[in-house]
Image (cartoon, rainbow, N blue to C red):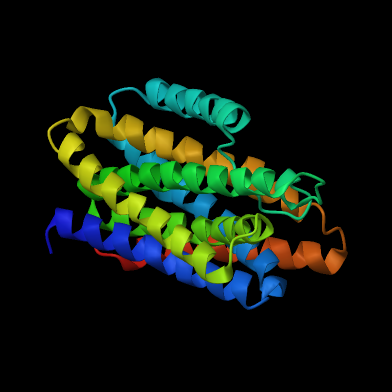
Amino acid sequence: MTTFTWIILASLLGGILSVLAAALFALNARASYLGGLVSYAIGALLGAVFLDILPEAIRLSPSVVTVSGTVLVGILVFFTLEKVLIWRHCHHDHCEAHEPHDHGASDHGRSGTMVIVGDTFHNFVDGIIIAAAFLVDVNLGIITALAIIAHEIPQEVGDFAILLHSGYSKVRAFQLNLISSFATLVGGTLGYIALRDMQSLVPYLLAVASSSMIYVAVADLIPGLHKRTQMRDTVQQVVLISAGVLTVAMLGMMMPE
């Protein structure tokens, strides 16, 4: 397959699969598995960053310091976006969107609308990241796409919860999340067109992708795990995070050079 075909398939299937998997959790009350999924997603994200994406960005760039600086700036930018634009979605029960409110239906509707707008933008950026990775190497693109799917599922579960809390029906919540997922395809297509002739930007876009994944794992997902303090929960979290890292490592070893 051509690189563009890989990007289209990864963007399209990634978005659809994450929404379908999230729907199974959110709409069928299988929340007991969500904590384990979040732990696995953390491992997949960090494994993809430190074993594949960041090393590739460093290899392609003439300056390691510039790549490291880009990661640092990226983390600060994502922190700012989270504060200003509500970049981060809820992954735990104590998020403001999950708290009981006394506001009217219009306030709930607004929170649902903001989730969809934010998720659409997030999916668009994910598409660009997938395109950048595939332009470097098909194997890197596959690993990046799998890591993005892994963290999209718990995020989409949170989106479903907020939309249902905002008064949307299950069918409407599913439709909106599915429509939003197609932004990944748009981002992947535009990313391919824009980056194909600007290869010098690819290592720094990979660095930004690394900062995004690090921030999601450390600021979004890990704090939710700290709410479960039992030793059994802690051991389970460590095992599943390690499993996520090992999955990425094994994929890297299995794929041909």
Please indicate whether residue 11 sits to the left or right of residue 54 in the image.
left
Q: Relative to 228, is 43 on the left or the right? A: left
- x and y, in percent, of residue 139 in the image: 28, 58
Kindly tell me whether residue 249 is visible in this rendering. Answer: no
* Image quarter hosting the C terminus: bottom left
Residue 120, percent across and down? 43, 46
- Count of numbered badges drawn on the protein: 0
Q: Quadrant of residue 197?
A: top left
Location of residue 161 by image quarter: bottom right
- Residue 1 sits in quarter: bottom left
Residue 75, percent from left and from top: 54, 30
Q: Nearer the viewer, residue 43 or 117?
A: 117
Please state if 229 lies on the left or on the right of 198 as rendered: right
Q: Is residue 175 above or below residue 209?
A: below
Q: Residue at x 33, y 22 (%)?
A: 63
Residue at figure coordinates x 62%, y 45% from the top left: 111
Residue 213 visible in the shown view: yes
